Image (tube, rainbow, N blue to C red):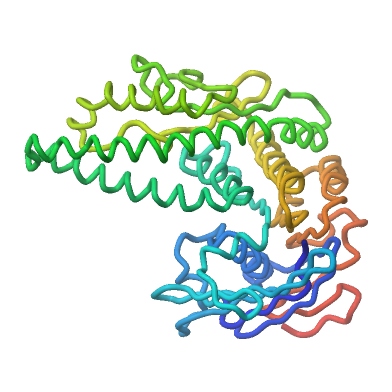
Amino acid sequence: MHVTRLTLRDFRNYPEAALDLDAGVHVFEGANGQGKTNLIEAIGYLSTLSSHRVSSDAALVRFGESSAIVRAELAHGERQLAIDVEIQKSGANRARVSGRAVKARELPRYFTTVLFAPEDLSLVRGDPGQRRAFLDSLLVTHSPRLGDTMQQYERVLRQRNSLLKSARAGQLGEAARSTLEIWDEQLVSLGSVIVAERLALIERLVPHLERAYAALVGADHRPGISMRVSCLSDSGKPMDDDEAANDTTGVVTLDEIRERFTARLRDARPRELDRGISLVGPHRDDATFWLNGLPARITASHGESWSFALSLKLAAAQLVRAESRTGDPVLILDDVFAELDGDRRRRLADAIAGFEQVLITCAVVADIPEPLREHTIRIRAGKIIGNETEPEEDA
C-alpha cells in the first residue's frame, strides 16, 4: 500500500498543504523547523493515532486553531480508498474512511506505517514502557482485535489498583477485599492473552531482526530478543534483579500462562496490599535486546544501539510485509542517514529498495545515497517547493 495524496489543514505549521506522491522513494529535504518532519508525522498519525514526537494531540493543531485535518488517499493494487481524521485540540477526534464516519480507533486497520526516528534509540536504552509499546503496536497491526483486549486490560488494571490503594489506606473491609478475586480473574484472562501474543510475536520477529541487522551492519553480532515476564518468573527473583533474571524464551501455551499467572498473583498479594499497586502482569514486563549474548541496553555502544534500533524497525516492516493483508507498510525514515557512515548508508539504501513506498527526511540531501534522490521535495517554512531540480523559491 502507498499514499498517493496527502492533504493537511491546520496541522502543525501548515495552514493548508497538498502533496501528490507515487510509489517508490521520496526524500523530504529541509533545515530544522521548516516542516519536513511534520509531513511524515501526519502520515504516521493516520496509521497509529499517535505522534512519534509528542504525547498530546493538542500539539498537532496549528496555534490559534481548534482542530486539524489530516487526509490521505491510498492505493493497494487496484483498490483505492481515502482516510481522514479531524484532530481536536480538546474533545474526541472524528474519522472517516472513503467518506463514511468510523471510530477514530479503527483507522489503523486500513493503513500501516513503520517509522524510524532518532527518538527510537530509546527502544534500546530507554524505559520498559517504550519497548512494550513497540511490541504492542506491532501486535495490533497484525491483529486489530488485540487493541480492544489491551484497552480492557488497562481498565481492569486501573480498577484493581484503586482497590489495592484503598486497602493500603485501611479503607477496604474484608468483604470488599474479596472483590479483588474478581479483578484477579479478569486480569489473568486478559493479561495472559497479551503475554502469549507478545511471546509469539518475538518468535516471528527475531529471524527478521537477524537478517536486517546482518544486512545493515555486515556482521553477525547475534542480535536477539527475549521477554522478562513477571507472571512467568520465579517468585523468588524480583523483576528488578540482574538483566538476565526471569527472561523467557520460546512460546508458552495460553493455559500454562494462566496457571502460572494465577499462582504469581497469589504469591504477590501481601506485597501488593502493602504497596497498593499491581505487581504482576504484562504492564510490568520488559523486552531484553541482546548482542553477542550480552544485553544491548548495558553493553552496546551508541553506534551499536543505533544500528540495533534501526534493524528492529526494518524487521518490523518485513514482518508486516509478510503478514499484512494490505501489503507493504509505508516505511518512514526520519533523519536517519545523517547518523550513518558511508558504508551503512549504502547498506540501508539496499535494504529498503524493495518496499512499495519509502519516505525519507533529511536536512542535507548529500547525506542520502544518490540512487534514492530522484524524487526530492524541498520544504521551506511550511511550503512544499517541489522537486530538487526545480528553481528554488524564496522562503
Q: Pick out the residue farthest to the front.
A: 255
Query: Image quadrant for the N terminus?
Result: bottom right
Examine the rendered structure and indicate whether residue 79 appears above or below residue 290: below
In which quadrant is the C terminus drawn? bottom right
Closer to the camera, 179 or 347? 179
Left or right of 243? Residue 186 is left
Is residue 212 shown left or right of residue 281? right
The tally of labels here is: 0
Q: Quadrant of residue 70?
A: bottom right
212 above or below 24? above
- Residue 260 x %, y %: 40, 22
Q: Nearer the viewer, residue 85 or 109?
A: 109
Q: Residue at x 78, y 24 (%)?
A: 220
Q: Residue at x 21, y 33 (%)?
A: 275
**Dividing the picture into quarters, in which one does residue 125 lie?**
top right
Percent of width and height locating residue 25: 84, 61
Q: Residue at x 76, y 85 (%)?
A: 394
Where residue 334 appears, x then y in whole percent? 69, 57
Which is more toward the observer, 132 or 257?
A: 257
Q: Is residue 275 left or right of residue 338?
A: left
- Which of the 4 quarters of the picture holds residue 9? bottom right
Reply above or below: 194 against 381: above
Report x, y in % for residue 194.
Answer: 48, 39
